[in-house]
């Protein structure tokens, strides 16, 4: 009979939607105890603390033992089974989030290779036990629980896959994210310039333009102009502000320049657009 210890709480995570855990557990498996073939809706990582067994997923069938881990991905068929004579004991952690796949990739875990080995000198069992004893619903511990999740997750790496990552591509995507964040938070400023954005990222303006055009298909100046005009449409539809006030709110110092740019992009003047109330 299985001796099982688990904490099986499923929650809707409102604070850490990009990367969060929802389930943690521990099991000393019976001989040939198995799961699958089947699929899960979320990610689950299993860490083996003793014994062994087989795991079969996208990367094929492998025998795993103490110190190894395997990652189950959402909606992928998988199967795992404890050894007949030396069944495994493992901890597991269920997780998900809008950036889960990206963060797995940062640890060298890709869709073709989801099995690895943790350094033998680690405190993972203690960390798992600590997490299982924490009160997830105590708001005073919310940050501590999330920090512990990150600490545990950081142990699961596949070093040999780091060479497959392109550091330059990752860096350029991050520059693009920061550019978009800067624009979305500052587009209403009359003095906003691409020079300033580039300097805030410690980049040359020409290089920033090259990166942004590659990532989103248009130069940064063109994106800034388009974003301002899109915001103007929203303000025109949802407020009674004058065209002059709208122009100033979205970063135009001259109402005539704003009106010409608006008509060029949308085919009608701001005044006519407002009268039709169409977006």
Image (cartoon, helix red, strand yellow):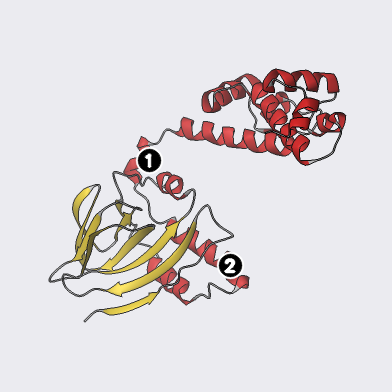
> Is 190 drawn above or below residue 85 in the view shown?
above
- Quarter holding residue 85: bottom left
Measure the C-alpha gap from mark 2 to mark 1: 32 Å
- Residue 253, numbered circle: none
Residue 150 spot, x, y in % from top left: 49, 58
Image quarter where the N terminus lies is bottom left
Residue 167 spot, x, y in % from top left: 46, 34
Residue 70 spot, x, y in % from top left: 30, 56
Residue at horizontal 31%, vertical 58%? 69
Residue 74 spot, x, y in % from top left: 36, 53
| Image side of residue 144 versus residue 274, left or right | left
Residue at horizontal 52%, vertical 52%? 18
Q: Which residue in the protein does label 1 denote?
A: 162
> Is 145 drawn above or below residue 262 in the view shown?
below
Number of other residues with Cα within 10 Å of mark 1, as a class: few under 14, some 14 to 19, many 20 or more? some
> Is 16 drawn above or below residue 244 in the view shown?
below
Q: Considering depth in this image, is 113 or 260 the residue closer to the camera?
A: 260
- Extreme front residue here? 276
> Is 157 drawn above or below residue 120 in the view shown?
above
First reached walking from the N terminus: tag 2 or tag 1: 2
- Quarter holding residue 164: top left
Kindly state the secondary structure of the residue where label 2 is placed: helix
- Quarter holding residue 269: top right
Residue at horizontal 63%, vertical 72%? 140
Image quarter where the C terminus lies is top right
Q: Considering depth in this image, is 193 or 232 the residue closer to the camera?
A: 232
| Image side of residue 231 versus residue 4, left or right | right
Q: Considering depth in this image, is 115 or 59 the residue closer to the camera?
A: 59
Q: Which residue in the protein does label 2 denote?
A: 142
Number of other residues with Cα within 10 Å of mark 2, as a class: few under 14, some 14 to 19, many 20 or more? some
Residue at horizontal 33%, vertical 52%? 75
């Amino acid at each position: 009979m299985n001796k099982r210890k688990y904490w099986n709480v499923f929650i809707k995570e409102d604070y850490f939607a990009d990367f969060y855990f929802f389930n943690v557990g521990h099991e000393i498996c019976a001989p040939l105890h198995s799961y699958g073939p089947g699929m899960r809706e979320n990610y689950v990582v299993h860490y083996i603390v003793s014994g062994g067994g087989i795991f079969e997923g996208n990367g094929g069938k492998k025998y795993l033992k103490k110190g190894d881990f395997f990652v189950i991905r959402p909606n992928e068929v998988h199967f795992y089974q404890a050894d007949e004579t030396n069944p495994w004991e493992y901890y597991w952690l269920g997780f998900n989030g809008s950036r889960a796949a990206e963060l797995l990739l940062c640890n060298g875990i890709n869709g073709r290779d989801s099995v690895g080995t943790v350094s033998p000198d680690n405190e993972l069992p203690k960390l798992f036990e600590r997490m299982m004893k924490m009160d997830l619903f105590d708001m005073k511990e919310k940050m501590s629980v999330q920090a512990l999740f990150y600490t545990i997750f950081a142990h699961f790496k596949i070093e040999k896959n780091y060479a497959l990552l392109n550091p330059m591509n990752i860096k350029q995507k991050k520059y693009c994210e920061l550019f978009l964040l800067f624009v979305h938070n500052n587009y209403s400023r009359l003095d906003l310039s691409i020079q300033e954005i580039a300097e805030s990222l410690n980049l040359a303006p020409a290089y920033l333009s090259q990166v942004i055009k590659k990532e989103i298909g248009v130069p940064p100046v063109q994106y800034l102009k388009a974003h301002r005009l899109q915001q103007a449409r929203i303000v025109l539809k949802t407020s009674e502000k004058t065209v002059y006030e709208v122009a100033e709110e979205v970063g135009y110092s001259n109402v005539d320049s704003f009106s010409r740019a608006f008509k060029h992009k949308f085919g009608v003047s701001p005044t006519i657009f407002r009268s039709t109330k169409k977006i």
